[in-house]
Image (spheres, grey):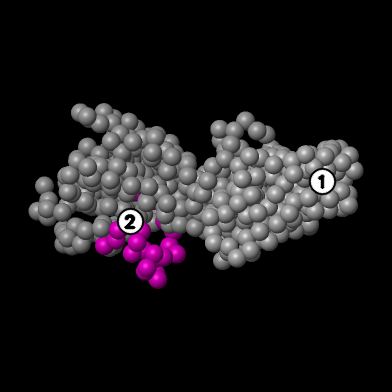
């Protein structure tokens, strides 16, 4: 047993992970939460390992390791996860072949008051922080080895891995008294490896839809959105479809600017804005000196003009009757999500959006800003427009909204 009270003495979880560190560790190794130094020492015993940086959040732990472990391959540092590495000019851009972590996992509510055991309020917060940063310090073909408890909630850990474009292999599961212990070998997914080669950095989970999952990243010092297929979706070739239509529509200044494309993902400029319905609700509660009405009318005109261009191109976007998640309002109006877009003889973008304008909720919000829509007239004008899609019939619809 260690003579330092802050050191986590090796138990079943440590020895279980140690077995696989000996087997899989390679190249440059980062051992996070080193504790007694068991994983760092085990790694150096492999001929495939060149060097180890062992870190721990507790200064007494690192001092203990420096005093008691004499190994030329190991460098000990005080750091809360990757925090100090980010600040160190020699380490902030360093990537490792192997990263090992035996995280604390007990919920704070158990009031153990031990940094070596408590993983946050629910027990899994420390692992979540770890996965949010691990990509930036792991080489493209690098591996991560972790051990964790069922008390950490396995489904949460699996979600954190997915949300960071990683994939895992269960190496071993063992039951001890009141918990199960899991050892995972984690690698970058093929999509993440491709993004690495494109030099897209700081990739983070953003949102999930029925057909796609959105991540954000940094590309050429600009924030970008990365869209991949939702693995639970049965839709086929949605990314390819969206890429094709964005290429067409970008020439008309419609949609987010497409930057990069692959069969598995697309990368476009991140659109900073709020969904259209949220915008209407926000502006309806704001104080107005008459500007709100002008702003809303200008916005509606802009949207209808973009949809008119799509109608003329015979492209139907779909979703325009319920465009809450498909129109973002920021410095400009941007239509997003073209997964379901398709060519058709009878496009209905403008007419679908007219249906949205006549919906009960939106009509109420528009009336708050002294904008009235005669439902019968809009329906009549929409039918005329659908029979003959031209600027004259579009203008009649715009003139009716006042």
Disc 1 and disc 2 in contact, CB within 8 angstroms? no
Q: CA distance from mark 1 to mark 2?
A: 52 Å
Pick whichever, 354 or 257, lies toward us.
354
Q: Is residue 315 visible?
A: no
Q: Position of residue 357 (x, y in %)?
A: 69, 45
**In which quarter of the view is residue 320 placed?**
top right
Q: Which residue is mark 2?
A: 81
Q: Which residue is mark 1?
A: 311
Pick whichever, 284 or 134, lies toward us.
284
Whether residue 101 is situated above or below residue 292 in the rendered picture: above
On screen, residue 310 versus residue 278, left or right, reads right
Task: Pick whichever of labels 1 and 2 is earlier in the sequence.
Answer: 2
| Label 1 packing within 10 angstroms: few (<14), some (14-19), many (20+) | many
Q: Which residue in the rendered view is the most extreme toward the left? A: 3
Identify the magenta region: 78-100
Q: Position of residue 29 (x, y in %)?
A: 36, 54
SS at mark 1 in the image:
helix
Judged by depth in the image, the label closer to the viewer, 1 or 2, is 1
On screen, residue 231 versus residue 162, left or right, reads right
Q: Position of residue 114 (x, y in %)?
A: 18, 49
Is residue 85 rendered magenta in the image? yes
Which residue sits at x=83%, y=53%?
Answer: 395
Which residue sits at x=46%, y=53%?
Answer: 135
Q: Position of residue 324 (x, y in %)?
A: 61, 45
On screen, residue 373 versus residue 216, left or right, reads right
Is residue 223 rendered magenta in the image? no
The C terminus lies in quadrant: bottom right
């Amino acid at each position: 047993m260690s003579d330092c009270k802050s050191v986590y003495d090796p138990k079943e979880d440590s020895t279980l992970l140690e077995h696989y560190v000996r087997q899989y560790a390679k190249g440059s190794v980062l051992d996070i939460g080193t504790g007694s130094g068991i994983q760092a020492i085990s790694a150096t015993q492999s001929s495939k390992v060149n060097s180890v940086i062992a870190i721990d959040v507790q200064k007494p732990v690192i001092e203990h390791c420096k005093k008691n472990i004499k190994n030329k391959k190991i460098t000990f540092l005080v750091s809360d996860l990757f925090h100090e590495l980010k600040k160190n000019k020699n380490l902030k851009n360093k990537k490792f072949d192997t990263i090992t972590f035996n995280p604390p996992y007990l919920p704070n509510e158990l009031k153990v008051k031990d940094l070596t055991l408590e993983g946050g309020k629910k027990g899994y917060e420390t692992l979540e922080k770890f996965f949010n940063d691990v990509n930036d310090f792991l080489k493209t073909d690098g591996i991560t080895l972790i051990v964790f408890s069922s008390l950490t909630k396995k489904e949460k850990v699996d979600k954190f891995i997915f949300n960071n474009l990683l994939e895992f292999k269960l190496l071993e599961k063992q039951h001890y008294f009141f918990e199960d212990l899991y050892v995972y070998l984690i690698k970058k997914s093929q999509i993440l490896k491709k993004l690495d080669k494109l030099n897209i950095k700081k990739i983070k989970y953003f949102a999930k839809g029925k057909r796609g999952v959105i991540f954000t990243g940094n590309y050429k010092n600009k924030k970008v959105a990365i869209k991949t297929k939702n693995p639970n979706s049965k839709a086929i070739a949605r990314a390819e479809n969206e890429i094709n239509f964005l290429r067409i529509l970008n020439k008309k200044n419609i949609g987010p600017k497409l930057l990069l494309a692959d069969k598995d993902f697309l990368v476009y400029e991140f659109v900073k804005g709020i969904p259209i319905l949220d915008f209407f609700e926000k502006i309806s509660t704001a104080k107005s000196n008459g500007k709100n009405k002008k702003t809303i009318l200008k916005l509606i005109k802009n949207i209808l003009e973009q949809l008119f261009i799509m109608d003329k191109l015979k492209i139907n976007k779909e979703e325009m009757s319920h465009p809450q998640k498909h129109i973002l309002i920021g410095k400009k109006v941007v239509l997003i999500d073209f997964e379901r877009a398709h060519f058709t003889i009878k496009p209905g973008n403008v007419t679908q959006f007219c249906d949205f304008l006549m919906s009960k909720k939106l009509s109420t919000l528009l009336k708050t800003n002294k904008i009235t829509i005669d439902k019968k007239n809009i329906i009549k004008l929409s039918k005329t427009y659908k029979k003959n899609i031209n600027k004259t019939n579009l203008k009649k619809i715009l003139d009716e909204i006042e």
